[in-house]
Amino acid sequence: MVKNVLFTCRNLLASVKNSLLFSFPLVLFQILNTISSYSVAMIIAHLGTRFSAAYSIINSVIMSTNIFFFGILSAISIFISYELGSKTYKNIQDIFNTSIYLSLLLTICNIILYLLFPKCLEMLSQPVDIVVIVRDYFAIASFGILPYFGGIFLLQILMAIKKTNISFYTNVIRFFLTLSFVFILCSGLAGIKSLGISGASIATVIVNWIMLPILLYFVISSNLMIKASKIFSKLNFNAFFKIIRIGIPIGFTLIIELILHLLNSIFAGQINIIQQAIYSLFLQSLVAIVVIPFAMCQCTSVSIANVCGSTNSIQAIKNILIADLIVALLIVTIISGFLLLISNHIAHIFFPDLIFMSSKDKHDITIVFRLTSIFLIIETIRLIVAAGLRGMQDVNFSLISNIISFLIIGAFLSKFLAFNYGFNSKGLILGELMAVVCSTCLLSLRLLYVIKRKKESEYMAYRTDEGICR
């Protein structure tokens, strides 16, 4: 009994160590992306209010489309990891070829979206100068979409072969190049005329094209790249629809929570400007920290897919889930605690006139930080559980549970608590918290059910093999 416990503990500790080594570079990768996004927004804010307002719209569109298309392309790493586990390299070639065609298709879709979005702003009677800025930005950004999706595709391959350290190193290069080009082109340094917000778009295009060959070099050096003569071979429709079948539900699952945030931002604006700012504080804190469990959940899905393709061991899947959950919760809990400690300083940064605010508004800010910490811990559990299901290619239930939890329960409770009970921004966040709790419970039940089914299949296979041996 003691030996079994010690053996299980050793396996769990080994899983925790592997989880840290695999996911930590990806966590740093996402943190750099967040810092880069905030830094670019700060540089553009110095250009003027209308440029800052236009960039907030641009950034919202880019973030939404990137998350959705990233969800589709994330199916690539899951399938490659699965096939690597089962050692069926012919299927990897098919997935590789299909992914190239898929990246081209998504590029065309994104370009059309970028070109049509300014027309939508005109229909919504947005100010003409804002529409012109957005149109010019997206017109330039369209030239950088192809290398961007190519880069995501190559990053998915690096993740599948567990080369996340390379992903981090390349992102460090991207980080410094992006900030340098944006600062130079937007501010007009080094003898270059200031290009305004268009400079940020040009900088992004240049960096995307620079990073594509760098990522391609690392993928080629990993020996997983197929021969150049086979890259654009005939499209395998079976592999294409397999990726789409998994990828599209993942994309919609990721974007549904963003829709609830958008709805609550509108609701907060209907209360008053202070409550809208308080809710914005919640979103900013959430976005800054949630990248950590989001990065770890990508590693979880890839690791579980690899196990499903090789041994399909239930114990190995449990070890990965528990280890990733321990690591993610530990990091997020420490950061959430630190957030509470410095909450007063953050509040003074966001609200310079805090001393003149009413005691009720000050109390609301304190409550928001506490709710944010609780929200982050539950959201971490939800993301890891959802990643476990993705790794086992069970994605449709996650989509259904998110629709029920966020768009039905979350939206209703947020508006009800904010307006009917007068909880204001606290009510909006409580509604989102209830949605996350509901989604976590549903996904956990589904995960237990899927593991139980796998355990039964494993037992039946064992009994069948035992019968054959006899």
Image (spheres, rainbow, N blue to C red):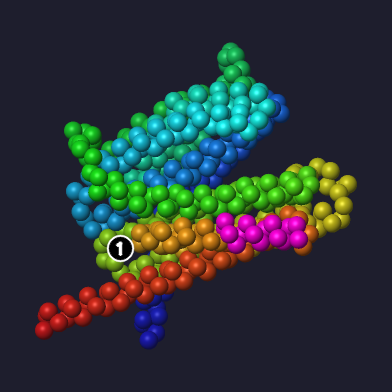
Q: Which residues are magenta?
A: 406-420
Q: Quadrant of the C terminus?
A: bottom left
Q: Is residue 102 visible?
A: yes
Q: As drawn, is 22 to the left or to the right of 48?
A: left
> Which residue is located at x 70 percent, y 60 percent?
416
Q: Which residue is mark 1?
A: 308
> Which residue is located at x 56 percent, y 53 percent?
257
| Residue at the bottom extreme of this rendering | 1
Please state which of residues 41 and 439 is positioned toward the viewer in this rendering.
439
> Which picture quadrant has residue 9?
bottom left
Name above or below for residue 357 compared with residue 392: above
> Which picture quadrant has residue 111?
top left
Give the structural element (helix, strand or loop) at label 1.
Answer: helix
Q: Position of residue 350 (x, y in %)?
A: 75, 44
Q: Position of residue 295 (x, y in %)?
A: 48, 52
Q: Position of residue 252 (x, y in %)?
A: 47, 50
> Which residue is located at x 66 percent, y 23 percent?
129
| Main secondary structure found in the magenta portion | helix
Q: As drawn, is 194 to the left or to the right of 360?
A: left
Q: Position of residue 215 (x, y in %)?
A: 36, 36
Residue 78 part of the magenta-drawn span: no
Please state which of residues 282 and 393 is positioned toward the viewer in this rendering.
393
> Which residue is located at x 30 percent, y 63 percent?
308
